Image (cartoon, rainbow, N blue to C red):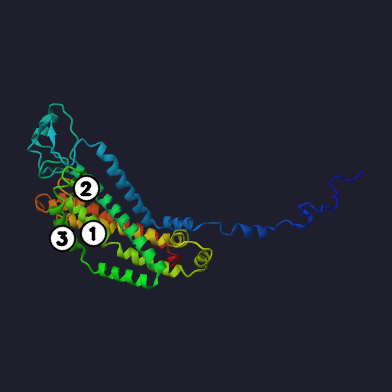
Amino acid sequence: MADINEKKPFKKNPLSMQMDLSRFTLATDDEKQSVDVMRPPSTFWRDGFKNFRKNKMAMVSVVVIVLIILAIIILPSFIPYTYSETIRVDGQRDRTVTNLKPYEWSEKEQEYIDNGGELFPHVMGTDQLGRDYFIRVIIGTRISLIVGFFASIIVLVIGLIYGSISGFIGGKVDLVMMRIVDIIYSLPDTLMIILLSFVLKETIGKQIQGTILSKIGTGMISMFIVFGLLYWVSMARLIRGQILSIKENEFVLAANAMGASTSRTIRKHILPNTISVIIISTALQIPSAIFTESFLSFLGLGVAVPMPSLGSLASEARQGLQAYPFKLLYPAVIISLIVLALNLIGDGLRDAFDPKLRK
């Protein structure tokens, strides 16, 4: 009787793809260890976010921004006051509720509480018109963040389209487009906002009454127009420089040789290779836009009254700076915190995704 453990000679069918396993040997312990220490497969984004998570300051900044965004979304639903109406006690207007300190009650409020009533505390006090300062700071933070993100999107879209066309086509078209950029770059942005604000106030100020545009005011409209006219030039220059260095690569030449259109070559082959630079530049543009809105609102060229922003709140606090310094402290601290956190996030993204800065 033949031994069942005896190996039979391997016979392969000519039409079969079966392999002779006897030709293979088991890997040694050293070979297994060398495979274990090899780096696992990864991608550009996975490596980038892995490096970003190692940046402690950037991660702390992300947590701060997330907490601020959650606060401005959730807290207004729990606060019974509004940013534009004066505080009322038992349905009646309280004229003694002006300029209260944090967690301080007016005479009528204290009397109402002594009689068994319940009121939401004034966490940051009240302003000179008797409005709760806490809800005004929350809404002001929301407005400033919305302006910053929306302005960054405007800059990104215009700069991306303009820079892509200029860099990819090149030649005389690039020369003319870049001279236009140089002219726009020389225009003073603050002066343009002031002039546009006065022009729009005289031309469309009455036409927008009663519409949603009247709530943000002609000053904010002029700010967005200036962002769309002037602030995209730096983004366009950056995108143009990236495309000039990429469009001579072999994969772009291969796409052109296969008959790909200009728009498809830009969308499918060039822009994906500049996406990290675009994200980093946009992340750094957001704090710049927030700071621009804040100092313009501080000058009275921002949102329309009574809608607040952090800059307009700081401007209003100047009048009673000696008597009520906390009114300037709250918006100033939040502006500094947001701008610092967004700058640290932008720096972290740059360090994580820029190949030239990797260790």
| Foreground of the two, 329 or 92 | 92
In the drawing, what numbered circle is on residue 295?
A: none
Q: Is residue 245 depicted above or below 328 in this figure? A: below
Q: How far apart are the alpha carbons under marks 1 and 3?
A: 10 Å
Residue matched to label 2: 140
Residue matched to label 3: 195
Dot 2: few (<14), some (14–19), or many (≥20) neighbours within 10 Å? Answer: many
Q: Earlier in the sequence, mark 1 or mark 3?
A: 3
Task: Residue type at mark 3: give it.
Answer: Leu
Tell me where residue 278 appears, x and y as whole percent.
38, 60
- Of discs 1 and 2, which sits in the foreground? 1
Task: Residue type at mark 2: give it.
Answer: Gly
> Is residue 355 in sight in this rendering?
yes
The residue located at (32%, 46%) in the rendering is 67
Tell whether 142 sits left or right of 208. Answer: right
Work out which quarter of the rendered image holds the N terminus and state it: top right
| Foreground of the two, 93 or 274 | 274
| Foreground of the two, 146 or 29 | 146
Dot 3: few (<14), some (14–19), or many (≥20) neighbours within 10 Å? Answer: some
Residue matched to label 1: 226
